[in-house]
Amino acid sequence: MTILEAAHALRTRRVCSLELARQALDRIQALNDRLRAFITVTEDLALQQARQADQELERGHDRGPLHGIPVAVKDVYATRGIRTTCGARIFADFVPDFDAAVVERLAQAGAVLVGKTNMHELAYGITSSNPRYGAVRNPWDYQRLPGGSSGGSAAAVAAGMVFMAMGSDTGGSIRIPAAWCGLVGLKPTFGRISRYGVLPLDFSLDHMGPLARSVRDAAVTLEALAGHDARDETSSRRPVEQYLPPQDPSLAGLRIGLPENFYFERVGPGVAEAVRNAARLAEQAGAVVAPVRVPDVAAMNEVSRVILLAEAAAVMQPYMNRRHELGEDVRLLLEQGLLLPATDYLQAQRLRRMMRDEFRRVWKQADCLFTPTTPVSAPPLGQSRLEWEDGAEDLRIAATRLVRAINMFGWPAISLPCGLDPQGLPLGLQIIGPPFSEARLLRVAAALEAALPRFSPPDL
Amino acid sequence: MPDWKLIAAGLELEIPETDLDRISPPLEGLHSRLRSLLPSIPLLVEPLVSFRSDPEEEA
């Protein structure tokens, strides 16, 4: 069931929020030992919010589509009186006395918070194999990675524990788990959703966004969360649009760019075919698909990694006297960042400006780009490298290769399921657009979602 | 090639020797790839970091 289906059921009194909350809590109770999707379950809060949601709907006070819907947030979002660990032992006892802006807005929209999801430690990685809170498992296959860093959010939504879970995306951390768990993952434009109250990984690359079971669920979540917040000085004052796509959205005249370089190189079985099939479906719906040449995305990835290494190290430097409490992979990345010269960081920021200006010329030829989200489907737990004909590639570098660069420019992107690989595992289509083109991306994604088969994990 | 071990010692970062052995190769790779891009930067290009002298104008 999707958010919009549940919202309809709530308003026709076929179900009440308290029932939905209890179902969510029961499912978490039944599956969390296996999936490790949640770090903290907020049962009392959820039941209280659900009762309030029911009372308000009874009285005719309707807060919108999220009213009475069980949701979760990644454990990077500060929650008043509830521990916020960032998936790290260092923050295991951190109990904020304030809510993140996202948590506030979810509450204002009437959503029911059932818990805080597991994640890659400090949101700094793609496996979500957390050294303290356990390795998150992929609901499609327990022996496979869910992706990360928002792996717990993805597993929780894919397993039907909640209708939507918020993630964060610094170099692909919403879109990668969305692709590997067969979900819709939306990374809005930088500044569209407030970062206030989110434990940062990187000041200038972190984006907040939902993982959901349908494009429309992601759209109604964005509608509830978008908007200016003076407490986040990078928050945009641009007016919020209507993001919910119309029924049967038209793609007539839309220009879709299919990159002829970089994005389809070194990809696994079925990946390119699934994305090209989605492009054909878009063409049948009236879009014009044309090849485009994109700038040097490999160089952009390198520049983005320099910025991330330096900024993440700056965030965490005050805690490095407790480095022994960090997982090995995260510790080594932070140590690399501490060693980078300041000139490297500043040159990366100069290259960032140049690369943004170069890449945005693509938007003269195309309204959006279609690319794979990840080069392969979910790898087995414990895998650390991918083998290609021309050599091996570190899994973290490979998994972020197609998604990392655009975080540097703050542009929006959505990942939606577009097919299954020969092993029956979901593959993601990434649609990238120019700044503040979320409504367009959601419209395209909704049209494709209607044209593609529905992809659901096996019964758990 | 920078001597990352000397830099770590000079900055008093207290990074264990075993970690330095592991992070030096990837760091060197990234550092040298960045260096290879520097000739492409025109003189007047400024870093893409936001700062305004009047905080009221920010955002």
Image (cartoon, coloured by chain):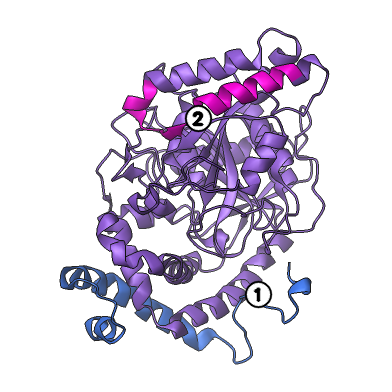
Is-magenta flag for residue A74? no
Mark 1: few/some/many CA within 10 Å (<14, 14-19, 20+): few
Residue B30 in the image: state x and y as whole percent. Answer: 36, 74
Residue holding disc 2? A42
Mark 2: few/some/many CA within 10 Å (<14, 14-19, 20+): some
Q: CA distance from mark 1 to mark 2?
A: 38 Å
Q: Chain of mark 1?
A: B
Q: Nearer the viewer, residue A306 or B13?
A: B13
- Note whether A233 is above or below B6 in the view shown: above
> Which residue is painted at 33% across and 58% down in the image?
A330
Q: Nearer the viewer, mark 1 or mark 2?
A: 2
Q: Is residue A310 left or right of residue A192?
A: left
Q: Is residue B44 left or right of residue A317?
A: right
Residue A414 in the image: state x and y as whole percent. Answer: 60, 44
Q: Is residue A320 left or right of residue A49?
A: left
> Which residue is painted at 56% across and 28% down in the image?
A45
Residue furthest toward the bottom?
B43
> Which residue is painted at 55% across and 52% down in the image?
A198
Chain with colour purple in the figure: A
Chain with colour blue in the figure: B
Q: Is residue B17 left or right of residue B53?
A: left
The numbered mark at residue A382 is none
Determine the image quadrant of residue A8.
top right
Residue holding disc 1? B50
Q: Nearer the viewer, residue A57 or A246?
A: A57
Q: Secondary structure at mark 2?
A: loop
Residue type, label 1: Ser
Q: Nearer the viewer, residue A323 or A282?
A: A323
Residue type, label 2: Thr
**Residue A153 in view in this figure:** yes
Please give the range of residues in magenta: A31-55
